[in-house]
Amino acid sequence: MSFFSFGQSAEIDVVLTDAETRKKAEHKTEDGKKDKYFLFYDGETVAGKVNVTLKNPGKRLEHQGIKIEFVGQIELYYDRGNHHEFVSLVKDLARPGELTQSQTFDFEFTHVEKPYESYTGQNVKLRYFLRATVSRRLNDISKEMDIVVHTLSTYPELNSSIKMEVGIEDCLHIEFEYNKSKYHLKDVIVGKIYFLLVRIKIKHMEIDIIKRETTGTGPSVYHENDTIAKYEIMDGAPVRGESIPIRLFLAGYEMTPTMRDINKKFSVRYYLNLVLIDEEERRYFKQQEITLWRKGDVVRKSMSSQATIGAQRFEGSVSSESALEKAAREDSA
């Protein structure tokens, strides 16, 4: 990005130290497109260089200081004027003075806390970015560079199955069971549905995965429901005593980990929604919340000790040692 003014001007470029080796991740932008960004985890150091290139060699560039910021912020689309910053770090690269030639400045933000996952939703955006600024009297010269943050979790120790009943007195009695209540993003939902009493002519049955994004507080709460997946369980009438297996692979769907009360601004929750449709097109629903989390595969490979910090975040998490032992047993199974 370049800004023109009277006399001298400059271009700024931000380059990460490990740009050639650092992994990139796809992330949806506000307009629905997907771009690739450098991927970071909680606790990792963010380091690099700021290149300030003068546009008119031989002319001086007077400035009021050069700095770089690392920012984590939440933007609510219905309140676009306000950016809520939950991380804000600043490094001064140069005192007020003048540049007579193009110059490079090193920077390092050590073991940066990145508590939340990057997220772009229907009403809210959570982003992390670096912003380099050459301060000037009339117009600053600045450049922003977005990064993506993934939050890793250890294996949950307690992961009870879900058992529920759907019933209409003297007409319908169904039990369904899912193998657990917490799933990682590439997991498989395994379950069974038992028909104990069927006096309604059911013609169709499906399971939906619903994402519910909640923004705001009090009277200004907005809910957005989005159906992520539809899984047809059966097409036709079941009979009493019949059981139907469920096997739903999550890896093919675009989902984030469950996000609860992020900085008191928004939440993202996921639900399994059982839908029954009878021959008169009446619909019957039963909904159950599940917890989604990002599996810390990278921990078991020789991940840097900085990123290991990010693998310890899970509500009521177990120690990383026992979690890794469990993961290793599951992988070898």
Image (cartoon, rainbow, N blue to C red):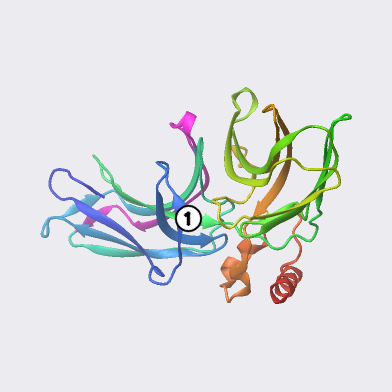
Q: Is residue 9 visible?
A: yes
* Location of residue 329 in the rendering, given as x and y in whole percent from the top left corner: 74, 74
Please name the residue shown 79% across and 61% down the image.
Answer: 157
Please name the residue shown 57% across and 73% down the image.
Answer: 303
Residue 188, picture quadrant: bottom right
Q: Quadrant of the C terminus?
A: bottom right
Q: What span is in magenta?
A: 76-99
* Location of residue 310 in the rendering, given as x and y in whole percent from the top left corner: 61, 61
State left or right for residue 113 relative to residue 293.
left
Secondary structure of the residue carrying tag 1 is: strand
In front of the other: 74 or 109: 74
Please name the residue shown 25% across and 41% down the image.
Answer: 139
* Location of residue 149 in the rendering, given as x and y in whole percent from the top left corner: 52, 56
Q: Is residue 314 visible?
A: no
- Judge whether 314 appears above or below 321 on screen: above
* Location of residue 177 in the rendering, given as x and y in whole percent from the top left corner: 80, 49
Q: Residue furthest right?
A: 170
Q: How many marks?
A: 1
Please name the residue shown 50% across and 37% down the image.
Answer: 122
Q: Main secondary structure of the magenta part?
A: strand
Residue 55, picture quadrant: bottom left
Kindly identify the amino acid type of the residue bearing the numbered disc 1: Val
Query: Which residue is denoted by mark 1 in the rendering?
Result: 148
- Judge whether 141 appears above or below 197 on screen: below
